[in-house]
Image (cartoon, rainbow, N blue to C red):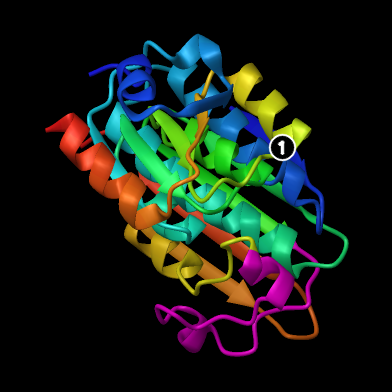
């Protein structure tokens, strides 16, 4: 099953909407609670990153079968300059406004890594970013 | 202990999410960093924070938290209150500083 959700840039009021829809979907599919929890954390962070950093928003694509869920979050940039540094806890390029909201603490990508069975981050400064989170549904 | 018990014992303001007042509290979490709450809070925690914008309710709902206490007397926006009503997440308030709210909650939960 494939699902697609739009992510609007800069609209923090709506940040989490796509993640919430995927969470409900996984609940309906009777996916194990632990897996729902970790998947929700990982995709929320990916969604917030698009809201906070991407110009023109992005998309969240969820592909679910009996074995795994693959969530792809794509935007059209600006991309990440140094992915290795972005993966470090505490490293952030968020704006002061975003930071004052309690976002941008440099925990987003580390949270994604911690809560994904497989995480792929492909980014190009002049292009966009593609984050692929894969979580297995069977232990 | 239910959220409604804590509201009564701590004299908290209920801004919204009244339908969730019978939620069971399993613990507490204190943080103003949203990713920290996202990554580390547990289901059933009562979250104490200075943040009062709409994403607070969003995170509380995604993490199935028992509710949120906004410390230091900040009043949330109408939109945040509406979100809490829709999600059934008790949105509570205290005029005390975070340290005092936390201490009180810790004692109340015993």
Q: Is B77 colored magenta in this rendering?
A: no
Tell whether A26 sits left or right of B1: right
Image quadrant of residue A127? bottom right
Query: Please, what is the dominant secondary structure of the magenta stretch?
Result: loop
> Which residue corresponds to mark 1?
A4
Q: Is residue B28 above or below residue B99?
A: above
Residue in the image at 63% along x and 56% along y = A48
Image quadrant of residue B48? top left
Q: Nearer the viewer, residue A37 or B48?
A: B48
Q: Is residue B87 above or below residue A81?
A: above
Tell whether A13 sits left or right of A29: right
User: Residue B94: percent from the left, percent from the top?
Assistant: 47, 39
Tell whether A119 sits left or right of A4: left
Q: Residues within 10 Å of mark 1 (few under 14, many from 20)?
A: some
Q: Is A99 colored magenta in this rendering?
A: yes
User: Residue B44: percent from the left, percent from the top?
Assistant: 31, 29
Q: Nearer the viewer, residue B107 or B40?
A: B107
Q: Is residue A55 above or below residue B108?
A: below
**Where is the N terminus of chain A found, in terms of image quarters?**
top right
Q: Nearer the viewer, residue A17 or B70?
A: B70
Q: Chain of mark 1?
A: A
Residue A115 in view:
no
Instruction: Looking at this view, name the residue that lies furthest to the right.
Output: A56
Residue B29 in view:
yes
Magenta highlight range: A75-100
Q: Is residue B91 above or below residue B8?
A: below
Q: Element at badge 1?
A: strand
Instruction: Looking at this view, name the residue that lies furthest to the left.
Output: B110
Residue in the image at 49% along x and 83% along y = A91
User: Residue A69: percent from the left, percent from the top?
Assistant: 46, 39
Image quadrant of residue A118? bottom left
Residue in the image at 52% along x and 10% along y = B19
């Amino acid at each position: 099953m494939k699902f697609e959700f739009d992510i609007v840039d800069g609209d923090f009021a709506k940040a989490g909407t796509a993640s919430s829809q995927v969470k409900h979907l996984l609940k309906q599919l009777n996916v194990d609670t632990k897996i729902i929890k970790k998947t929700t954390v990982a995709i929320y962070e990916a969604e917030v990153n698009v809201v906070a950093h991407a110009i023109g928003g992005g998309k969240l694509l969820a592909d679910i079968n009996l074995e795994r869920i693959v969530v792809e979050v794509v935007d059209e940039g600006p991309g990440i300059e140094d992915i290795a540094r972005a993966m470090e806890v505490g490293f952030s390029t968020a704006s002061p406004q975003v930071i004052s909201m309690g976002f941008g603490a440099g925990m987003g990508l580390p949270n994604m890594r911690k809560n994904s069975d497989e995480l792929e981050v492909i980014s190009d400064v002049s292009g966009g970013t593609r984050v692929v989170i894969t979580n297995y549904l069977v232990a | 202990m239910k959220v409604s018990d804590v509201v009564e014992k701590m004299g908290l303001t209920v801004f919204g999410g009244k339908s969730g007042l019978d939620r069971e509290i399993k613990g507490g979490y204190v943080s103003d960093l949203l990713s920290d709450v996202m990554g580390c809070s547990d289901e059933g925690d009562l979250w104490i924070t200075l943040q009062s914008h709409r994403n607070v309710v969003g995170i509380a709902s995604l993490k199935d938290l028992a509710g949120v206490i906004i410390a230091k007397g900040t009043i949330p926006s109408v939109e945040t209150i509406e979100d809490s009503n829709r999600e059934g997440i008790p949105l509570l308030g205290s005029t005390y500083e975070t340290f005092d709210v936390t201490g009180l909650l810790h004692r109340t939960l015993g």
